[in-house]
Image (spheres, grey):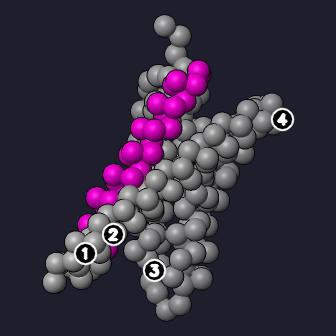
Amino acid sequence: MNSRKWVRLFLTTLVIGGVLTLLSSFIIKSDSYAEVFQPFQMFELLGLLLFFSGLGFIFSVISQMGFFAYLTIHQFGRGIFKGSWTSIQLFLIAFTIFDLIYFRYQAAEDSSIWPYIFTALGLLLVSLVIAYLKAKETNKQAFVPALFFMVVVTSVEWVPALRAASSDYVWLMIIPLVVCNAYQLMLLHRLTAEK
């Protein structure tokens, strides 16, 4: 991959993260917007738009760091563990799903386990679709690595929001993370393909 393609990947992912977070904020943080419209406060509205766009840019940079870190880890894993790397990835996927349900539920006080189950299964379902599409466009050996990236790496990137006291930021962060990760994963083989 040359520098022009890398810059294209970086900038498009940055824009996707910023736009998605801004659009998501209209729904997830609608109370913040309601405050600046009654009465209308132009500078506060502009500040909110800049804040949520900037937050989206940060989320997309986190996504990109995770993507390039995974590309490195994947090469090391293939070299060190050889044929068992696929089994290790499947184990880590299962452990991450368990972690997203059980440990988050244990850390919460007086809440139901069902929101944690639905959240983890939702991430797994989206990840399965993206991994299937990646394998269909490249080869069947790409399924497990793509699934690993979408589940495990996305969950690691999501940790700052999961630790936050407000559930708003949990949802505000996961939407751009999943889309940015899926975008990078699906664009990579197009950028590196030989003409």
Tag 4, which secondary structure?
helix
Q: Mark 3 and mark 2: span between their CA atoms?
A: 17 Å
What label does residue 48 carry, if any? 2
For the residues labelled 3 and 4, say whether their Cβ atoms are less than 8 Å apart.
no
Question: Mark 2, mark 1: which one is toward the viewer?
Answer: 2
Question: In the rendered image, which residue does mark 3 sit on?
Answer: 166
Report x, y in % for residue 40: 16, 78
- Where 86 falls versus 173 (above or below)? above
What residue span does the magenta drawing correspond to? Answer: 1-29
Q: Mark 3 and mark 4: span between their CA atoms?
A: 40 Å
Question: Mark 4, mark 1: which one is toward the viewer?
Answer: 1
Report x, y in % for residue 43: 28, 72
Q: Earlier in the sequence, mark 3 or mark 2?
A: 2
Q: Residue at the location (52% across, 31% down)?
A: 7
Can you tell which quarter of the image residue 50 is in? bottom left
What label does residue 80 carry, if any? 4
Task: Classify residue 173 as left or right of residue 102.
Answer: left
Tag 3, which secondary structure?
loop
Can you tell which quarter of the image residue 56 is in? bottom left
> In terms of secondary structure, what is the magenta stretch mainly?
helix
Can you tell which quarter of the image residue 6 is in? top right
Q: Could you say which is closer to the camera, residue 179 or residue 133?
A: 179
Q: Mark 4 and mark 1: span between their CA atoms?
A: 51 Å
For the residues labelled 2 and 1, say whether their Cβ atoms are less than 8 Å apart.
yes
The amino acid at mark 1 is Tyr
